[in-house]
Image (cartoon, rainbow, N blue to C red):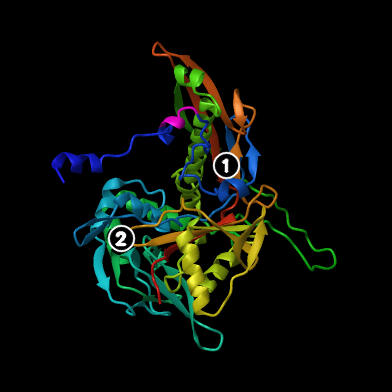
Amino acid sequence: MSVGEEVRDTQQPPQQSLGTAAARNLATTTKSAPQMQEITSRWLLRMLPWVQVQGGAYRVNRRLSHSVGDGRVTFVQTGDQVTVIPAELGELPALRDFGDEEVLAELARRCEQSEVAPGEVLATSGDAADRVYLLAHGKVEKVGTGPYGDETVLGVLADGAYFGDHALVDGDAAWEYTARAVTACTLLTLRRSDVLNLAERADSLRDHLARLLAIPHQRTNRYGEAEIDLSAGHVGEAVVPHTFVDYESAPREYELSVAQTVLKVHSRVSDLYNQPMNQTEQQLRLTVEALRERQEHELINNREFGLLNNCDYGQRLQPHDGVPGPDDMDELLSRRRGSKLFLAHPRAIAAFGRECNRRGLVPESVEVAGHHVPAWRGVPIFPCNKIPVTESRTTSIICMRTGEADQGVIGLQQSGIPDEIEPSLSVRFMGIDEQAIISYLVTAYYSAAVLVPDALGVLENVEVSRWR
């Protein structure tokens, strides 16, 4: 066979009909609407009761409370050296409202760093207390004695916590529990003797401590609120006590936050390519979805009003074994009445399921809006991927009571704004520029408020990657 004959044999036969690529130019393609992977279930936005806010702000009035200094302490790490930020010492009850920065800096320098091993006892119940411990890293459990002499865990402390603060001003202070390290811990210690020695040379600190000791003891209930004097069970002509309910003089106000973007669509696109789907509508739909996703993220993580940052420190718990177990979920529920829902990262829900499987438990499920949702003690556990998972593979689980009537957590919005397309979300036409581009301002207003501290609780430092 010659070379020319071989080339003719390998050539494709001539086309005898219209090709599919050309035919599609004359056909109407079956197509989907634009898809978006970022869209989630957004259970928080769906389950949170939304309260109409007039004037852009919501004021939370509460009874006067005398509880102070219940925050956490922040540290700075340089290599293996840890120091406390001087202003953070103001979180200690004995140093609250003390503003002498030089003295605070000197107290911070007098804090001694120490490393302790798991199982090491830091303080023993009944011993004299002469120092405050600042927990920079690790876990410490408070251990007490049960009614029959057995050991019982009263609580678990983690990064940023402190204990023994009453020893700074009370020379007769004693430890009411035993403090024992659960993990390797990094601690800073501030001794009462260092505080008193510095007070002898610093007039501001000496005067502050003197004023603190001169303040009469405030009668409060177990929530730290000013006591309401009542009389019950009396007979005869007993004198009925006089009382009144005092309010906070400067209640907190939540202002509506905003999320905005400018959506731009070329006029040629909106004029010529609107069949079978309206391009402007599809662009707007996806933009609103992204805006709602950001709204839920802000409601969880915003430093001003986000749930994780606004949970009272007395309502923050630590898992006893790192992984989220049924005992931890029960403890979270026990801190409040009428809990309506849990919020957890999907990986935290999976870790809780593994722990239930290990114990031979089968979590129930409840039906919410046509969906079967896992639940614990009848309280639904909703997934929320906006709750962060840290590099150390830990996250948080949120539990809350909702609604104004129940003094719970509420969402804040203002409906009826100009050019509104959804409650508290508007799309405003901004005009057409010289490049024939149409602009729309898309705006959402929102916030969240915690009406009383026990409406919101958080289980922190939950491990999600431990398999056993």
Q: Is residue 25 magenta?
A: yes
Could you tell which of marks 2 and 1 lies nearer the N-terminus? 2
Judge by depth and name the residue closer to the eye, 91 or 425: 425
Q: Which residues are magenta?
A: 22-26
Camera-nearest residue between 123 and 256: 256
Q: Quadrant of residue 201?
A: bottom left
In screen coordinates, is 55 left or right of 122? right
Q: Which label is found at residue 353? A: none
Q: Position of residue 52 (x, y in %)?
A: 65, 36
Give the residue number, with chain letter if any, for mark 1: 249
Which residue position is annotated with label 2? 195
Furthest residue toward left: 3
Q: Nearer the viewer, mark 2 or mark 1?
A: 1
Q: Which corner quadrant holds the C terminus?
A: bottom left
Find out whether residue 101 is within the magenta segment.
no
Q: Please, what is the three-letter code of the amino acid marked with disc 2? A: Val
Question: Which residue is at 45% across, 28% downward?
Answer: 25
Whole-percent x, y for residue 274 in the image = 53, 24
Q: Residue furthest top?
A: 434
Measuring 45% from the left and 17% from the top, which residue is drawn there? Answer: 268
* Vertical placement of residue 201 versus 360, above or below: above
Q: Residue at x 44, y 58 (%)?
A: 213
| Residue at image coords 67%, 52% | 369
Residue 358 drawn at (x, y percent): 49, 78
Q: Secondary structure at mark 2?
A: helix
Name the kind of residue labelled 1 in the image: Ser
- Using the rendered image of the protein, determine whether residue 250 is visible from the camera's viewpoint: no
